[in-house]
Structure formats: structure tokens, C-alpha cells
Amino acid sequence: MKFRMPAMARRSDSKHHQFERRVPQDIIERARGQLVVIELPPLKGAKGTTVHTTLGQRVKFSLKTPDNDVAAARTGLVLAHLEKQYDAIRQGPKPLSQKEVIAYSGEAYRLWVERFEDNPGPVAEWSAWKAFTRAAMEGRILSAPAASTDSLPNETEAARLQFGEDLTAGINALPRSDDTTALEQRFGQVLSWVLTKHALHVDAATRMALLRATAQASHLAAFRLKRAADGDYSPDDNEKRFPALPVNGQQSPITLTDLFDRWMKETKPAGATITTWRSVMKHLKAHLGHENATLITEQDAIAWKDAAIAKGLKPKTVNDSYLAAARRLFSFGMSNRLVSSNPFAKVKVASKRQAGQKKLPYSNDEVANLLTLARAETNPARRWLPWLAALTGARIGELAQAWGSQVREVEGFHILDIKPAPDGGSLKNEGSERTVPLHPALIAEGFLDFAKAKGNGPLFYAGQARKREGDSNRHASKGVTNRLSTWIRDQGFNDPRKAPAHALRHWWKSAAARARVQESEADAIQGHAGKSDAATYRHFDIATLAAAVSAIPSPLDGDTRGGAQKTPEASQGALRRPSEPPQLP
């Protein structure tokens, strides 16, 4: 069923927003008394929190934030969880197989490890935590403190008073029983978190089996955390005992990680795309509290979008990065019958371009100043990348991964091959691969001598190790581009509307227009796609492109300009101006 967003309200005695909503009339009696546990992620400075609420006539609790945007995002997340939970209640309690019980209990194992493995605290605390857990599992005690996932355990003194100095001997001295009171106290809330997360409504026998399995999984996690507290982070084989999470009675549903990995192996995207999209999937997983792709609904997608905006991300970032990545992955999943729908297909942030935000090119004076600064540098990237970007119009990432073997001679012209680096580099798209003639001013600066001295390997980064298949680590040239951008900013180029290096590419396109270079030629040099299908039939020879490159004057007064640098072996004489048609043989 669909929910309309409730109005947010504040209690008279609290500055925090409240969530309040009626439980649907058709399930009130069946839902009454059921504990719902929902994780609310950190947003816009508000800390993450866990909501525990019992269903009755109404659902009511604090959203733990005074911020309107955060409250709205959390409201959307809560509605998505409740909608699934109510649908499960309508369908009635269902049994689970033993394999499904163990699979779902793995959620508790992963919860403890993810929360506490990085900073597990003292060894003694996990020893005490394990003691209470085992005693509750074996029915040796009638009450036990509730296991909290929000903070590190603080049970050492309580365990000593309960079991004595020797915890193992103290537990063993108590008789076993079938009493589950302490077990319910210990892990009832953790079990409710698992049930809420997966919208499970199970029968009594299944619930008890799942409670025991959740306790066992938590106990195994405590062994791992105790070792981590002692400095031992060796692999834990216990993680392998939990089967893949089921959905709709089927084993091994597709996860966000599976979906991303299959898309990555099939499409072989650029390294920067892999890094960015993997981060997006991590953010989505953290927001949902799971990564079962088949369980994600359009309401989940909307809540995730709202949460990203509440976090302070710009609408363009959410639309063009977060939602675009998710939409593309789920489209791939549908095409390969991995998921049945794309919950992100119609979700977007309402936005419009604002005046004063459009990216701008550098001015002629700014380019001249930057190239003058670069001329004084000894660092190869600082010395040559600004010159290459200004006089080829190429993307800085394309240039940073260039190898000496890509600087060569074609038909008597010195050129740079823009192509993926042999050690695993990548370009933006298929059309980005191209041959760009070198500008006379660039050659006059001594770039050919520099490239020859570097040999056939990378010009601007060290190492030639080939990346492994499927390796998602960013290419070494990415660090070069980042450091160059920092250096440019440090030189005083701080206009936020002028990207440190990319503004050179904007300048080149503008300079090409001023020099009356045909737009189709400029597109071919920069690797831009043509605006019509006819553009795919258009191909330019090196001489034509070299004339176009040379027609653009260097922004530094007195630099070489005019005819392209052509070797003595070139078969033609003076170059045509870009406006002249090529002569047929």
C-alpha cells in the first residue's frame, strides 16, 4: 500500500522531530505488541541511531534530530520499512527452513563485526559478554542484560559478580535448563532488528529457532572480536558457515555487490568509474541496512535520495552520480534477468541550473600565467601537463596516463596518441581514443626531447605493473591529476567556477572557435562526440587536424605560431588553413 508523508511535529518538551502514524486498520490486531527495530543512518551531522518501537494503535517515536531535512529523510526510511513489515503481517506468519534460519542469523554476526571490529575495546569486556551469552543460551540464568549494538559492552563487573573470577567455572557450576527467558532478554532486540530489516513475519517455532541461531551467530562474532581486541585480525572461517540470504523462498538472491561485480566485469568501465560507483553502492547499502537488490523498492530509492540531499549533497551530485549509478546497475540487472524491476528508474532530484554556477574557461591571461609558472617547474607533471592540456585540448586524465611510446611521428607530423595506458589505464568512452597533432609551441618548448629522454614508459608516474583483471584500484595517473589540481589551486587559481585543470580544456575549445577552427575538427581533436549520426561518417587526416591545432595561437606572446611542425620527410609543403578544403590526390 502507498503512504503519504506525515506532517512532522515536535513534542512540547523536546526540540526533536517526532514520527507518528496510525497502524493500518486491517492489521492492528495482528500487529499489536510486535517490536520493530530500525537503523537510522547518520546524516548532516546527526549521529546514526536505532529506533525501537512497539506496534499498537499508532507508531510513535523520536526521530532524534531537530533538523527538518534529516527528519524528512528519516521519515521516508521509516515508512519504507513499515510498508514492508505491514505487507508481511498481512500475508501471515510463515515458517523458515533451517538453511534460511542460519542465513538470516548471519546478519547478526555481520552486524557485530561491522560495528566493533575496527575498535573492539578491551579483551575482558568480550570475555564477559561471551559469558552472559553462553549462560543465556544454555538456560543457566533467568535474566541477562540486553546485548546492545550501539556501544561497546560494559559487562566485566556484572559478569564477575554473577559468575565469579573464573567465568567458565562459574557458568559450568550452574545447572542447564530449557528456560529461554534470559535468551529473550539478551537477543530479543537483535532478532527484531533482523526481522524488521527483512520484513519477516514468522511463526512461533521459527522465531524461537531464529532466536537461538541469532544468539549462536552473535557468540561466534564475539570470539572474533575478542581476538581482534587482542590484536589478532586473522581470517575467521566462521563467516563462511552462513548461507546466502534467501528471498521469496529462493536461495542466493543477487546482492548489490554481486550486481556491481557482474556489471564491472562485463562492461570494463574506467578505473575512476569503478571507484566512484563502488562508493555509491557502499552508501546505498549503509542506508538500507542490507544489500539484497531484489528487496529494494521505489520507496527505498526515494528515501535514499532524500537522505543524500539531507546530508548536504548537491542535487547534481545525487542525480548524476548516486541515482545515475544505481539506475544503470539495475538496468543492467534487468537486462540480464538478475532483478525484476528498476526501483531507481523514475527517481530524481528536482533541480534546475542556477545562474552563476556554469563552469567557465580560463582567460588568455590566466592560461599565459599558468604556462609561465609551469615553465619554471622541474616536476614533469607540473612542467608539461598544463602545456599539453592548453595546446591539445585533451582531458588532464588522458594526458597524465600517457607513455613515451604514444609520442610518435605519423605522415611527417609529431603526434600524441590518446589511448588507454598499457598498464590498465582507461578513457572516458570509445570516442575518446584519438590521435592529436602536437602544437608547434609545445615542440619549441622541448616536449619531444623530454618524451625521448623518458623512453617508452609512463611520462608522469612511476611503475609499469599491469593491473589484474577486475582490479578496482585507481590507476596511478589519478594521483598525478589530483596533485596537479592541488598545485594549480596553490598558485592562486581559486575561482570555483574554473576547474583547476579542466578549465584549460574549456579555454582550448573557445580559442579554437576564435581561430575559426571548424567545430567538427575541434570535436575530433578533443574526443567529443558529434551532434548527429552523420558525424560518425566523418574522418579527418592528420594534416587537416595539424593545421587546425596550429591555427590556435599560444597564449604566451612571442611563442611559435603558424604552420604545424612537420618533419623533413613530410610529403606536403605549407599546411592549409582550417577553412580550406582538403585537396584530393
Image (tube, helix red, strand yellow):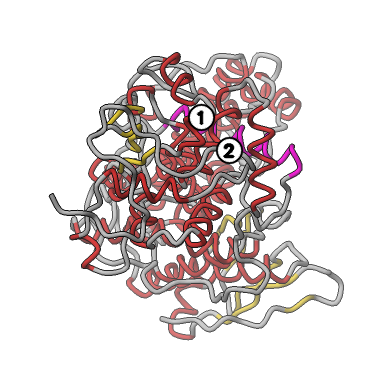
Distance (Cα) linking label 1 and label 2? 8 Å
Question: 106 or 456: which is nearer to us?
Answer: 456
Q: For label 1, count other residues whose C-alpha is less than 10 Å away and answer few (under 14), some (14-19) or many (20+).
A: some
What residue is disc 2 on? 559
* Residue indicated by mark 1: 444
Disc number placed over residue 91 in the picture, else none? none
Q: Nearer the viewer, residue 499 or 170?
A: 499
**38 inside magenta stretch:** no
In the rendered view, tell whether residue 120 sits above or below residue 289.
above
Q: Quadrant of the N terminus?
A: bottom left
Q: Is residue 445 left or right of residue 7?
A: left
| Circles 1, 2 touching at the beta carbon (< 8 Å) | yes
Which of the two residues, 252 or 87, is positioned nearer the viewer here?
252
- In the displayed orientation, state which residue is furthest to the right: 13
Stretch in magenta: 473-492
Where is residue 549 shown, x and y percent of the image? 42, 47
Name the amino acid, label 1.
Ala
* Spot occupied by residue 478 in the image (x, y as percentages of width and height): 50, 34
Q: Report the amino acid beneath label 2.
A: Asp
